[in-house]
Image: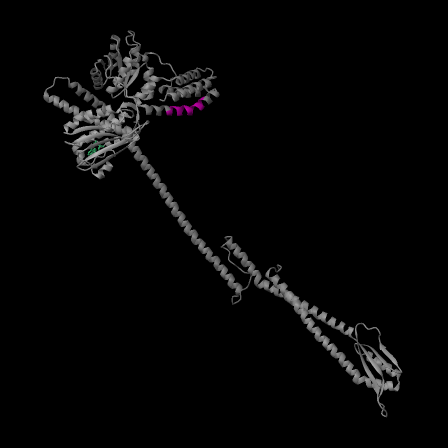
Amino acid sequence: MKLPGGLARRLLLRVLLFSLCFTVLASAVQLYFEYRREMRDIEARLELIRVGYLASFERSLWDLNQEQLNVQLHGLVDFPDIAQARLRSADFNLMQGSESGRGPLRVERFALAFQPPDGERRELGELEVSIDLGAVYLRLLHGGLASLLWMGVFLCGLAVALSWLFHSLVTRHLRRMADFVRGLTGGDLGTELALDKVRSGEDDEIDTVADALDGLRRALRAELRRREADREALQSTRDELQRRVERRTASLRRAKEEAEAANRAKSRFLATMSHEIRTPLGGILGMAELLRAAPLGEQDRRRLQALSTAGEGLLAILNEVLHFAKLEDGASQPEPVDFSLRRLLDDVVTLLEPRAQDNGTVLRLRVDPQVRDACRGAEQFLRQVLSNLVANAVKFTEEGEVLLEVAVLASDEAGQRLRFSVTDDGIGISSEQQEKIFQRFTQASDEVARRYGGTGLGLAISKRLVESMGGEIGVESLEGEGSTFWFEIALAPGVVPSATAIVECSPALEVLVVEDVALNREVAQALLERDGHRVHLADDAEPALALAASRRFDLILLDMHLPGMSGLELCRAIRGQAEGRNVRTPVFAFTASVQPGMVRRYFEAGMQGVLGKPLRLEQLRRALAGVTGDAADETVDSGPLDHRVLDTHRRLLGEHKLAELLDSLWRLIDQQWPLLLDALRQDDAVEAASLAHRLAGSCRSMGLRGLGDCLGELEEAALAGASLMGWTDKLDREKAVVAELLKSTPA
Ligand code: ADP
């Protein structure tokens, strides 16, 4: 059995203390009553002596019978607790009993007298009885102690029994319940509360508490289960929701990717189609242009005019579509140039004046005198936006007035912020439509579309162009009353070139055009002849070689895709002719393939320039100006950068695209460089040759000649099995030179 502790122990201690007090008190009371009884006994004995013994003592004393007296004294001493008996008289002094008492004595004296029958009463002496109170006390003490002892033992036993009973009835169950509650707090809700106790018919308090606790456990368990079920339900709902979101996101992503791909495909398709249609259309228009010189009747002339006008319209639409596709692709970026704003505005007005006159509309220009003439910015973009807006205003206004106005919003050293506005009093645009017309392919209404035609792209293009110049565009309009289209852009101050950048006319040249498509051939011829050049045509390599052998040309335009021989081969063949007439004649590739890799190959084959297809007059004139005026082309350019290649890229692809290409080339170099150096360190000739080959091609294509050549030499050395020692330093030097140059001469 476990030792009772806690409550039971406290109970035991208190019962013990109480028993002790009680025992002491009870013993004291009992002692008191014992003492009183003893005293009464002594009194009774003394009374007995007085009544029963005194007379016989008086007689014996009268008789002087000493012996008798001794016997009688002895008889007294035999009484309990009488320690001594002494007789004192005139004749005797007798004593019985021990002299030395054990404790305090009580002495009683009795006077002895005798009345003889004949005489008077006479005093005889005195009897002295000593009672031993010590013995009485000792007896009392023993009795008291014995009762104290027994009572103590009894009460202690009672206390132990009580506390054991208390323990077995109460505290051990309380302990069990405490353990049970601790288990509950620890999360054990599965174990029932079982007390080590037999239940009789009626529940006692312990049973009631135990039942309440077990009830608590069951309630907690039910609540926990309910919560767990709720949590699981919530979790599964959340999981389901998550899965749904994921599915939805994935399908949205797919849809977005598909839409983007479709949009890209659409843009590509549009661009390709426009491009494909534009080439033959250019031919048709060229032919129409040539036909103008022919002797035609009035009716045919009008038909020809109608053909030209329709063709020009179609070309404009195609150009818009192509332009928009390029803008969407991000291929078209503003390139800042110096220009005269006044001249630009005059150009736009002059160009559209005839159309305005056709509509009976007056076209006016008002420029704030504060507007600076010399500006620097994306002139082409600005020109196009103004042309679009003025053309629209003229188109939608009959017998009215169109005002092109330029105002200064802010002005400082860094430039001017200008507001361009085109106001007309034409058909106007409803407010709902005003929000939409800047979206691509959107027109105000079907009726407008039917009546006025158009693609619905002009404003979308204008918006993009204005935004790419960092400006904003908008419209204010009232239906039936007119519209004001406006945009605001900042223009930096610039230097106005003394003459136009385009060389209007170069001296008359002898030009050989080698092109298998008749239409292209004739367009090129017509354009060249318009500027007064003399043109010789060949449709294949053979006649071209024959012509080249027969005379010297100032310029040869070579189509790169001839049926018999490629343009590259033909170029080499012309250069290598025995007659040697055109060894130094500038040869231009005339091609639609103007990717950097191709351009490099044209130059490597000994060509001086590239003309993109479709051929544009301005481009042609610029190329011709280079041929006639720039003798530097003849000198061999041998720096680390091939400027001719770079300039051609710049002309054909635009500044932005060139920068992009150079950027991606540097990324490729940065990525491959460590691999190449590693291969060199390992003396791995095969790997080094393959890496060098790849990088060399890319470098040369982009005009990084020094680095390209160095890599080329490395490739050759590696393939020839030469030592690869020392190449690392050389390569790093070349790379550093090119990096430095590109940094200082922005592409
Ligand atoms: P397009 O003129 O080729 O149809 P735009 O994008 O230039 O395409 O113009 C979109 C539409 O905005 C036009 O179809 C026309 O309905 C409306 N719009 C543009 N300019 C004007 C204007 N000055 N007056 C009235 N409506 C205009």
Front-most of residues 431 and 565: 431
628 within the magenta span: no
- Residue 559 visible in rendering: no
Q: What secondary structure prevails in the magenta region? A: helix
Question: What segment carries the magenta color?
Answer: 663-676
| Side of 715 relative to 323 (left or right) | right
Q: Residue furthest bottom?
A: 118
Front-most of residues 242 and 640: 640
Q: Tell me which residue sits at (42%, 24%) in the image.
A: 670
| Side of 187 relative to 386 (left or right) | right
Q: Quadrant of ligand 1?
A: top left
- Residue 171 visible in rendering: yes
Front-most of residues 404 and 11: 404
The percent position of residue 372, horizontal first and vertical second, equals 27, 25
Q: Tell me which residue sits at (28%, 13%) in the image.
A: 629
Quadrant of the drawing holding the N terminus: bottom right
Q: Is residue 256 above or below residue 586?
A: below
Q: Is residue 411 above or below residue 561?
A: below
The percent position of residue 492, horizontal first and vertical second, equals 31, 26
674 within the magenta span: yes
Q: Tell me which residue sits at (80%, 82%) in the image.
A: 49
The percent position of residue 225, horizontal first and vertical second, equals 44, 53
